[in-house]
Image (tube, coloured by chain):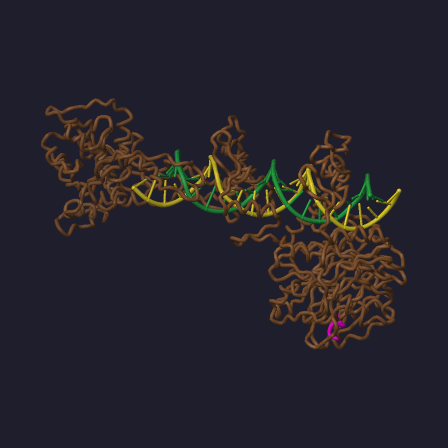
Chain colours: A brown, B green, C yellow
Amino acid sequence: MDGSSAEAVDAPPKDFPSIQAVHSQEALVVDLLQQAAEAGGVVQGPAAVILEQGHVEGMVAAAQSQQALLEAGVGVSVQRGEVEMMVMDSLDPTLMQMKTEVIDAAVGGSSATVGVVAGATHQAAVATVDQTQIITLQVVNMEEQAALGLGELQLVQVPVSAAAVDALQQGTFVDTTAMPKTGDPVICHTLPLPEGFQVVKVGANGEVETVEQEEGVEAHSEEDEDDAEVGQQLLEEGEEAAQPANHHQNWAKDPDYQPPSGGIKKAKKGKKSRLRYAEGDKDMDVSVYDFEEEQQEGLLSEVNAEKVVGNMKPPKPTKIKKKGVKKTFQCELCSYTCPRRSNLDRHMKSHTDERPHKCHLCGRAFRTVTLLRNHLNTHTGTRPHKCTDCDMAFVTSGELVRHRRYKHTHEKPFKCSMCDYASVEVSKLKRHIRSHTGERPFQCSLCSYASRDTYKLKRHMRTHSGEKPYECYICHARFTQSGTMKMHILQKHTENVAKFHCPHCDTVIARKSDLGKNGQCEAARPASLPWAHSVCLSVCLSAGVHLRKQHSFIETGKKCRYCDAVFHERYALIQHQKSHKNEKRFKCDLCDYCCRQERHMVMHRRTHTGEKPFACSQCEKTFRQKQLLDMHFKRYHDPNFVPTAFVCPKCSKTFTRRNTMARHSENCNGEVEEFENGAATPKKGRRGRKRKMRTRRDEDDSEDDIPEQDEGEEEGEEEAALLQEEEDLEGMELDQAPAVIPVVAPDEPPVKRKRGRPPKNPKPQTPSRAGTASSVAATIQVEDELTGAVENIIVKKEGGDAATSVKQGADLAVEGGVGGGEGVEEVELTVNQETTAATAANGDLTPEMILSMMDR
DNA sequence: GTGTCCGGCGCCCTCTGCTGGACGATT
DNA sequence: AAATCGTCCAGCAGAGGGCGCCGGACAC
């Protein structure tokens, strides 16, 4: 707030008596209200209040009735000289929602409206409510918030009856606390505070703190007692003003903060304060929810104290009660006053721990007989209040009413002003509002988590304690939440569980959350785009994995890698690309050869040109590919090279490839074909073997896209050689693991790992793929003399360990694996007595042994 | 003094959805 | 063999419904 703004403020006119300017710097707001009223000619509604000034100069919030604002011609964005009312677009969404509501409501008006006025540098949101709504208002001083880090001011309104409004029009909420002392907080204005309004401060992190209205009440009641402009005084009656040390401890973190100097009494008991509102010679009770005690009781964290919602009385319009002029009896321990002695006596019991009425069943003591009787009903099961619509019965009539609201009438008197939520109970509304404010009062003592209600915190604490109170009655697995257990039972122990069918493909997924939401996502899919099939019409972009990944709309579109087709959905793209499978798009100009990869064609053309650009440095061999040269070098010129063999577990034949061995093993009956010398007989040729190329991938753009060879197509010797090279090359690429041999196979088979999230202290698990390695006795790399390709030969155990097999003279089949292809190169080996002698001391096969076997 | 009304708190439950590791299938 | 993908699955939190119980206030 700049100085000019302050200067522009004049003294409050007489026709606006309920506004009292004490602090000149903050007279701006008062003036604005007054000017607004003047502009409209009449101020009919009760002006709202700004009590908090303190050291926070310029942080001002004021509320005024919508009627007054409207009649004054002051909307939510009125500018007047250097003073302007602004609606801050950067307010949180809920407040913006409120703002919208207000603007919308401005035409029709409503029963109770609150306007928030701010100075030139203050921005405000305004909300309109009816009598059943609870609204939250924020007033933000952007400049000073940034400078002081003080956050926002927030006004909270609760239902206000017409009677209350009328009453308040005649009265003034008098600030009596803060005297203007140098350096001390100063209450700058006194404005009428309708019942239910609460000024709270919302910190930068969302923390909310009550602005102590009582302080202002006291200060002003003393200083301005005789002020003729103040028609009535509000006398504080209930629990006294809050405790400065406690209350301001959050504010005290602000280096600029200075506690109020006025004496403030500590509230003693009760969560509800009562403010007496003086109207002429009448007194009005104005109940104000006292959040302070909750915080003191430790139910609320210091930072996130529950102060967003003020007085949440049920929407009964006649809550403000008029009392007699004189209050005869007043409690000495608190501000409670009552017209009858008996009332006071009864009240005094609340200050003592006297509980004369004891339950003879459990020993619990109560202050009143009624309480004891209700308590006894819990023992006896006596429930005199029976529901006429169901079999339920309750101890008290109130419980019955509430039950009927929940189950039968569905009456939900407590409505949220920020959304459509409504609740039977105000406590539920309070809890709900925390979801708007982000408030999390319940802080975990062990981590940074904070919850919005106690139950969530309690549930969260199980993550620290490890408590798992829910046990599956079938498998006795334990869970932290009942829902998790139920889902477990449903998925693991229940037959015919309903699955979730993807509406756009044939996928069936067990859990709905894995499939995803079925929300509308039309907004995400431009209607102008040609892509308009049904896929995304019911898919939310933020949905689960399947829908999100497979069926979500891709705005930019993805082009098929084989043609020019463009798709906006991954699923459709993949399906389309599969249609290109087996297409051979590259054709040789010199022969009939065609293939699916350009690199294949490059190599093929070298068969026409005879080009072999890669020469071995150790011999005269040349190769068409560098990788082939590398393989050659490794096999013939690298002394550390050892091939790998795969052994059929049934007949002990060896294979150079795993897949070949596996395919053989499927049809193997365990009989060993023997050579004349007793060695196992290879079924097929050796070098120049028939091979099966890897199936090409449907999706990947990787260059290891190999033509299918097992389709019975003969593509000529040249290509066979080329493919051989390529396969060898791929084997080379895949078998680059260090040739450390022998590799002792694990003795124990792998344990099937339980699916799902592992326990917090997982035991070391054997990799699932060890199932293959479990039968591996040794890994040997062999270099092809012809091609120079290196082959990994894995010697596998059959039943017992390798050493046993060898010692028994069992035949071992060794397959040289030159990659993951399925090409066949069978080498039959026989482990006889001679090789037994070469067995390593520990019984494993040695590389020398295997090579010896292969040499045979 | 008693009974009733009402507010408030706490607890427990269900439903829902997100997250990330595990794991089998595919490439 | 390794990378990738998609589903399974438990863990965990958000939100809200429902109810038991206590205690203050008030009328009779």
Side (left or right) of A454 relative to A634: right
Tell me residue A311's x, y (percent): 74, 54
| Residue A663, position as x, y percentages in the image | 28, 29
Q: Quadrant of the N terminus of chain A?
A: bottom right
Give the vertical position of A699 relative to A338 (above or below). Answer: above
Q: What is the tally of numbered marks visible in this picture?
A: 0
Q: Which residues are magenta?
A: A24-28
Residue A611 makes an appearance in the image: no
x, y percentage for residue A90?
Answer: 64, 60
**From what the image shows, is residue A819 above or below residue A389?**
below
Q: Quadrant of the C terminus of chain A?
A: top left
- Decide which of A823, A409 is in the foreground and name it: A409
Left or right: A699 in relation to A372: left
Image position, residue C26 (x, y; %)? 84, 48
Q: Residue at x 14, y 45 (%)?
A: A636
Magenta stretch prevailing secondary structure: helix
Q: In the picture, residue A63 is in which quadrant?
A: bottom right
Can residue A443 be seen here? The reply is yes
Camera-nearest residue between A60 and A723: A60
Tell which of A313 and A133 is nearer to you. A313
Q: In the shown orientation, is residue A491 left or right of residue A805?
A: right
Would residue A335 appear left or right of A662 to someone viewing this image? right
At x 76%, y 51%, the residue is A349
Q: Is residue A355 magenta?
A: no
